[in-house]
Image: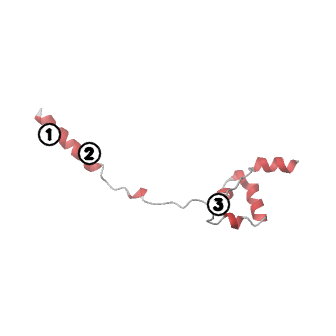
Amino acid sequence: MIKNLKLFTVLFLALAIQSCSNNDDDDYVTQPKTIYEHVATSSNYSYLTYALQKTNLDGVLNGTDNYTLYAPNNMAFSRFLME
């Protein structure tokens, strides 16, 4: 019985020490994308990207200010242009 208790204690301490390792991979912060970066990197918003460039709003939405953009996808642009 005492032998099992000692074995359990040693195993518990070994696991406790192992779990205390510092993992530096989780200590970084990524910068969020701007609205324009998100739109420009998505193939579903290529018409919107073109429209933002033509209206010079790409520079505004590429900044760090807070904006809300209701972004029509390519299908919405196509349906609008067909009317």
Tell me the distance, in whole angstroms, between the alpha carbons under discs 2 and 3. 45 Å
Residue at 54% in and 61% down? 31
Binning the other alpha carbons within 10 Å of mark 2 as few (below 14), some (14 to 19) or many (20 upward) gives few
Mark 1, secondary structure of its residue: helix
Query: Is there a contact, CB below 8 Å, between mark 2 and mark 3?
Result: no
Image coordinates for residue 26, horizontal then vertical, percent? 42, 56
Residue at 73% in and 55% down? 46
Identified by mark 2, the residue type is Leu
Image coordinates for residue 44, horizontal then vertical, percent? 71, 50
Binning the other alpha carbons within 10 Å of mark 3 as few (below 14), some (14 to 19) or many (20 upward) gives some
Image coordinates for residue 13, horizontal then vertical, percent? 22, 46
User: Going from the N terminus, do you reach mark 2 or mark 3 first?
Assistant: 2
* Apparent side of residue 17 relative to residue 82 in the rendered image (left or right): left
Identified by mark 1, the residue type is Lys
Q: Which residue is mark 1?
A: 6
* Apparent side of residue 55 relative to residue 6 in the rendered image (left or right): right
Residue 6: image quadrant is top left
What label does residue 59 carry, if any? none
Q: Which residue is mark 2?
A: 15
Image coordinates for residue 73, horizontal then vertical, percent? 74, 50
Q: Is residue 44 above or below residue 63?
A: above
Q: Which residue is mark 3?
A: 37
Binning the other alpha carbons within 10 Å of mark 1 as few (below 14), some (14 to 19) or many (20 upward) gives few
Query: Is there a contact, CB below 8 Å, between mark 1 and mark 2?
Result: no
Identified by mark 3, the residue type is Glu
Mark 2, secondary structure of its residue: helix
Mark 3, secondary structure of its residue: helix
* Apparent side of residue 23 relative to residue 3 in the rendered image (left or right): right
